[in-house]
């Protein structure tokens, strides 16, 4: 198995990964981190709304809905083979 880097928005429902970084600065990034989206945290894509916005993820044992542009700021590493 090789790890592969992508954004949270790229995960398919049921797929899991580990947060490697959050791009950007300022209040939005601080808010995402306050919600538990921290480097090294495991995250799972639960579902995407029709059209892909918003997305629902599970992090730290709870479900969280994010806008697609927020999900694109979050880099994740998966253990999927490439």
Image (tube, helix red, strand yellow):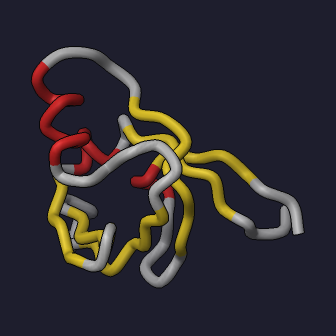
Q: Please say if 32 is above or below 36.
A: above
In percent of width and height, residue 75 lies at 50, 41
Q: Residue furthest bottom?
A: 14
Q: Residue at x 18, y 30 (%)?
A: 30
Q: Is 27 on the left or on the right of 63, as rendered?
A: left
Q: Residue at x 20, y 75 (%)?
A: 63
Q: Residue at x 75, y 69 (%)?
A: 80
Q: Residue at x 45, y 57 (%)?
A: 41
In percent of width and height, residue 22 lies at 40, 33
Q: Is 80 on the left or on the right of 70, as rendered?
A: right
Q: Quadrant of residue 66?
A: bottom left
In percent of width and height, residue 20 lies at 55, 42
Question: Which quarter of the figure is the N terminus placed in?
Answer: bottom right
Q: Please say if 54 is above or below 27.
A: below
Q: Is 19 on the left or on the right of 2, as rendered?
A: left
In percent of width and height, residue 34 lies at 16, 44
Residue sitting nearer the eye, 72 or 24? 24
Q: Quadrant of residue 31?
A: top left
Question: Which quarter of the figure is the C terminus placed in?
Answer: bottom right
Q: Please say if 24 is above or below 65.
A: above
């Amino acid at each position: 198995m090789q790890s592969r880097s992508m954004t949270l928005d790229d995960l398919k429902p049921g797929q899991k990964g580990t947060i490697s970084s959050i791009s950007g600065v300022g209040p939005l990034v601080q808010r995402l981190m306050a919600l538990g989206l921290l480097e090294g945290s495991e995250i799972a894509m639960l579902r995407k709304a029709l059209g892909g916005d918003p997305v629902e993820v599970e992090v730290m044992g709870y479900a969280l809905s994010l806008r697609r542009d927020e999900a694109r700021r979050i880099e994740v590493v998966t253990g999927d083979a490439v």
